[in-house]
Image: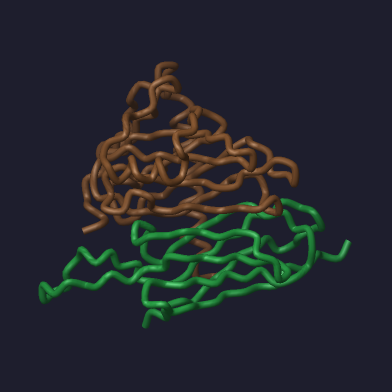
Chain colours: A green, B brown
Amino acid sequence: MPETGKTRIVLPERIGRDEVIRVQVIVQHPMDTGFFRDANAVIIPAWFIHDVRVSYGGEEIARFEWTSGVSKDPMLSFQLRAVREGPLTFVWRDNRDREYTGSTEIKFAAA
Amino acid sequence: MSLNEPIERRHFLQALGLLGAVATVEGASGAAHRLSAAVRVTRADPGDPPPIPNEVVQRIYAERFQGRPIQTGRITLDIPLMAEDGRYVPVIIESDLPQTEEQYLKSVFLIVDHNPDPLVTAYHFTPVLGPLKLQTRIKMKRTSWIRAIAETSSGELYADYLKVETSLNGCG
């Protein structure tokens, strides 16, 4: 069963202070455009994430505007400077005004 | 972690393969090159960006760029080999522009000219992000120019344009 809003965040195993790291994130969501029909020829209504907020250590660091043009189960990777330890949190909001959250901890590896 | 790692790894390897292919076949004039039997990707000439195709894209340009000049370069858009399926078109956007407190990439806009909603995504960043190296997957309704346009903290605009021919409608 799909679990809408379920978020997976993948970070490098070892993170050093001020290192530039690759953050990969995938969130389960149908991202329906509203233009397709199901097997009974009934329109599948538009349902997609349109607003993404990324925070790091409690501070908003990025915001993404999405549309239904982003593929089902959206995947994104980007680079982040690991300047502090703290939670990295994604808040996804869709066009049905539902909100989903995924979070992980950024921790520095012992020297 | 185990859920998406194999998928991600596969895409990444494909992306690397494409970058190699582009490097070897791309001519000085940005001539069309065939990536596979089903997909053609054409890079725009630096001096010859694709024309604005319709009113919707015109409106996006007016709202987001207010008529400011857009230079070609400093940002690279790449599409790996799987674009024959319009539901999952992998996209890589990279830039050598700095990401520091003094000067940084503020926004990146991804526009697919012939999609129902051409502004597929807009990313807004702060200096804590690293240099731009972004991967995602988007949908394409049909063959179209794709525009990646970056805006710096001082308001300069840089772009790269790829024409991607795709067969399976991913938008409905």
- Outermost residue to the bottom: A1
Q: Quadrant of residue A53?
A: bottom right
User: Residue A23: x and y, percent?
Assistant: 61, 59
| Above or below, A37 relative to B16 | below
Which quadrant of the rendered structure holds the N terminus of chain A?
A: bottom left
> From what the image shows, is residue B49 above or below residue B110?
above
Q: Quadrant of residue B154?
A: top right
| Quadrant in the rendering for residue A40 | bottom left
Q: Residue at x 50, y 47 (%)?
A: B13
Q: Please, which residue is most extreme toward the right here?
A: A111
* Image quadrant containing the C terminus of chain A: bottom right
**Place of residue B163 in the rendered image (x, y in percent of width and height, measured from the top left):** 33, 35
Position of residue B171 measured from the top left corner of the image (x, y, whole percent):
25, 57
State the residue at coordinates (64%, 55%): A22
Looking at this view, is B13 or B72 the one in front?
B72
Q: Is residue B106 above or below residue B157?
A: below
Relative to B18, say whether B127 is above or below.
Answer: below
Residue A104 left/right relative to B77? right
Residue drawn where x is 38% and y is 60% of the image: A67
Q: List x then y, in percent, for residue B127.
A: 69, 50
* Residue lying furthest left: A41
Q: How many marks?
A: 0
